[in-house]
Image: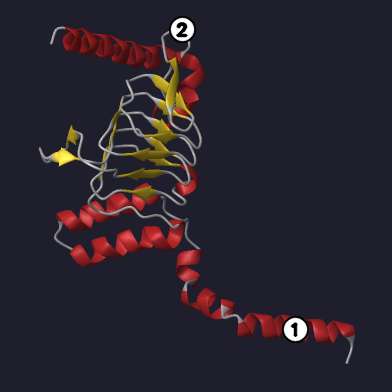
């Protein structure tokens, strides 16, 4: 038997013994389609839940695990235009976590609980899981834990561990996470492309959003100082 023939036989054995062909045959229609992002799958689950179709909603939750190796319960609250890095690989979101509009979540990110409740959640009860504000960027490998709030437009650096409240417009790095910079009108353009939901905005409109966030931050600070 020739060397080439043995090679062909070996390849045939590999394909049959490892079950790859069986999976390809069973999933051929799905594999010819684009892979939906974790956010798209979660959105579909919400539609099913609204229609009272709990079975398909749960299938969506499981699909996120199968396609992205991610745990994203249907009970998670997410706003509009949430973006997941690489479609949402390796993400774990606590079932009671709250994610704002335009948030960017990198791969291998965890948003989870930690100890006693420290904030009031959407249900009005004490929550021991994070609230992620609008247009927050959580970079790859980061962990955001406990009943804390991450302020709007804040950027969490890669592999950071955040367990305390973060003011709006903050840049956070390290373990434990610490604020190393504030996002201002002077430096905000350096971060524009990180806010994926806002990439289509021109610079003037983007600057207006940042200015409004700065004014709101100052107003909240003044209100707190008067207490």
Q: Secondary structure at mark 1?
A: helix
- The mark found on residue 55 in the picture is none
Looking at the picture, the colour scheme in use is: secondary structure
The dot on residue 186 is 2
- Which residue is found at the position 34% from the left and 63% from the top? 62
Above-or-below relation of 14 to 70: below
| Cα distance between the residues tagged 2 and 1 | 63 Å
Hey, which residue is sitting farthest front in the picture? 115
Of residue 219 and residue 51, the one placed in the foreground of this image is 219
Give the side of residue 120 with respect to residue 111, left or right: left
**Position of residue 39 measured from the top left corner of the image (x, y, whole percent):** 35, 47
Q: Is residue 34 above or below residue 108?
A: below
Residue at the (51%, 76%) spot, across then down:
23
Q: Which quadrant of the view contains residue 55?
A: bottom left
Which mark is first along the chain, 1 or 2? 1
Mark 2: secondary structure: loop
**Is 200 drawn above or below residue 84 in the view shown?**
above
Where residue 48 appears, as percent x and y from the top left, is 21, 58
> Quick one: 128 or 1, which is closer to the camera?
128
- The residue labelled by disc 1 is 10
């Amino acid at each position: 038997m020739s060397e080439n023939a043995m090679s062909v036989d070996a390849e045939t054995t590999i394909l049959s013994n490892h079950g790859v062909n069986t999976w390809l045959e069973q999933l051929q229609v799905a594999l010819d389609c684009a892979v939906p992002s974790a956010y798209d799958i979660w959105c579909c689950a919400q539609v099913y839940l609204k229609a009272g179709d709990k079975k398909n909603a749960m299938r969506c939750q499981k699909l996120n695990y199968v396609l992205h190796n991610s745990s994203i319960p249907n009970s998670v609250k997410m706003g509009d235009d949430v973006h997941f890095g690489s479609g949402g690989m390796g993400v774990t979101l606590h079932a009671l976590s709250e994610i704002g509009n335009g948030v960017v979540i990198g791969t291998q990110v965890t948003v989870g609980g930690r100890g006693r409740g420290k904030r009031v959640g959407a249900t009005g009860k004490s929550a021991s899981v994070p609230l992620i504000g609008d247009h927050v960027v959580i970079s790859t490998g980061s962990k955001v834990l406990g009943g804390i709030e991450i302020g709007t437009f804040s950027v969490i650096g890669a592999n950071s561990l955040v367990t305390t409240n973060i003011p709006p417009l903050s840049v956070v790095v390290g373990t434990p996470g610490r604020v190393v910079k504030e996002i201002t009108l002077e430096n905000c353009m350096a971060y524009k492309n990180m806010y994926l939901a806002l990439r289509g905005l021109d610079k003037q409109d983007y600057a207006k959003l940042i200015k409004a966030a700065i004014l709101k931050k100052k107003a909240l600070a003044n209100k707190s100082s008067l207490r």
